[in-house]
Image (tube, grey):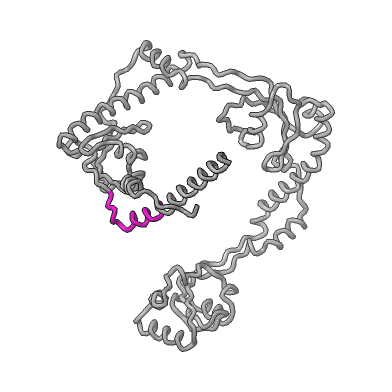
Amino acid sequence: AGGVQAPAALLDGYIGYLGETRDVVFAEIPAAGIAPASPDDAVLKAYYDAHLAEFTRPETREISYIWLTPEMLRDGIAIDEAQLRATYDERKAEYIQPERRKIAKLVFPTEAEAEAGMAKIAAGKASLADLAKERGLSAADIDLGDVSQDEIGGAAGEAVFARTRPGVIGPYETDLGPALFDFQAVTPSETTTFEEARGDIAAELAMEKARRMIGDMTTDLEDRLASGATLEDMVKETKMQAGKISMAADTRDGIAAYDAFREAAAKATTEDFPELAVLEDGGVFALRLDGVTAAAPIPFDQLRDKVEASWRKAEVVKAKQAKAEVAGAAAAAGQTLATQGLDEKTAPDLQRGGFVEGAPQGLAQTAFATAAGKSATLTEGEKVFVLLVRAVKPADLADPELVQLRKTFDTRLGQLIGADLAAFYARAAQAEA
């Protein structure tokens, strides 16, 4: 069960399959010069009938609902001025940002080494990044970003913020040892006054209070629905508001923007009684399924312009595909795509499942299904591409990456085979007993 030796031929075949590459050229077929003739109604009606699913109104669930959200209550809530002031004072750190400076910091084991490093910098023989590199550190390793004087602390903080011009200073003692500091840039202080922040604070506190108010109402609302109150009764007797919506699978407007509502609407049946449920923002709702409108084709007369637009797109794609077939045949015969007026691009050593910038997503899959010297057409949406496989290159089994991959598969496959053999043996022994 600890593993067995996997068949070498199986491993070599699989690694060869994974490591095979292709040299590919490709180009997109432009729409320039393609202009389908104006179709008559007979052509469009035939297209409409052949693509009826595209012109069918989806099934919809007709929903009546009531809801109450914090935003509905917010405008009627007044916040005490003292509370606004107190909240501003509590969050002063958010509204008053001290001056900050972009700093890099390099700590040294001893004061002498720090001073020697500073001497090199002062003599123009090195930068702080150079000194960091000598110690195996990158510029990112010593970058502190934008920091305040308090975040630096001590004499180092005072010295850095006393400078008016960028440069390296130090050494200064820190919690980690003597350090040099590279002052690079200043981020000025920012202050948002109480008057500037007042509106946002008031809106936030009002929303918080509205959520609490809805929470306090929840038990009463649930009891009313449980006692048999209809949605219409709830609108008359409470602050909840009514609405109706036709819900399709992709409806996201209004209350359907809430996940909780969409999930409840999808599960509802006409026999269900409305129940109170919670929305993501702290609001509540209840709904009733009034009925289901089955999917049905939209009459051709109502969609003629849409049908024609869809037909034109399809005709352009067909024309592009025809051009791609011609260009591919010419390319396979030795004529380059560029000499055919196409914007030829290359993808040398394309790997199975590889990605090429500016290429269609299906390029690799199509290329690996195409023989050397052969062309293929690839359509993605309204875009059409022609490609030619110039060469198929077998995997180099001596490549270090493939050697390591083979070792990994060898170990894993051996373990799987060993586990299978152990299971077969156990079942055989059990059956024999």
Q: Which residue is drawn at 55% across and 30% down?
A: 250
Q: Which residue lies furthest to the top in this view?
A: 42
Query: Is 393 situated above or below 385?
Result: below
Any magenta on residue 189? no
Which of the pair 367/249 is nearer the observer?
A: 367
Left of 265 or right of it: where is 216?
right
Task: Residue 96: name its quadrant.
Answer: bottom right
Query: Is 40 situated above or below 387?
Result: above
Any magenta on residue 400? yes
Q: Which residue lies furthest to the front in this view?
A: 433
List x then y, in percent, for residue 251: 58, 30
Which of the pair 121/78 is nearer the observer?
A: 121
Q: Residue furthest left?
A: 334
Left of 136 or right of it: where is 240?
right
Left of 227 or right of it: where is 156?
left
Task: Residue 37: name its quadrant.
Answer: top left
Query: Is residue 351 visible from the viewing direction of this image?
Result: no
Query: Is residue 411 visible from the viewing direction of this image?
Result: yes
| Magenta-colored span | 395-409
Q: Which residue is drawn at 22% across and 33% down?
A: 328
Query: Is 383 situated above or below 115?
Result: above
Principal SS element in the magenta part? helix
List x then y, in percent, for residue 311: 37, 21
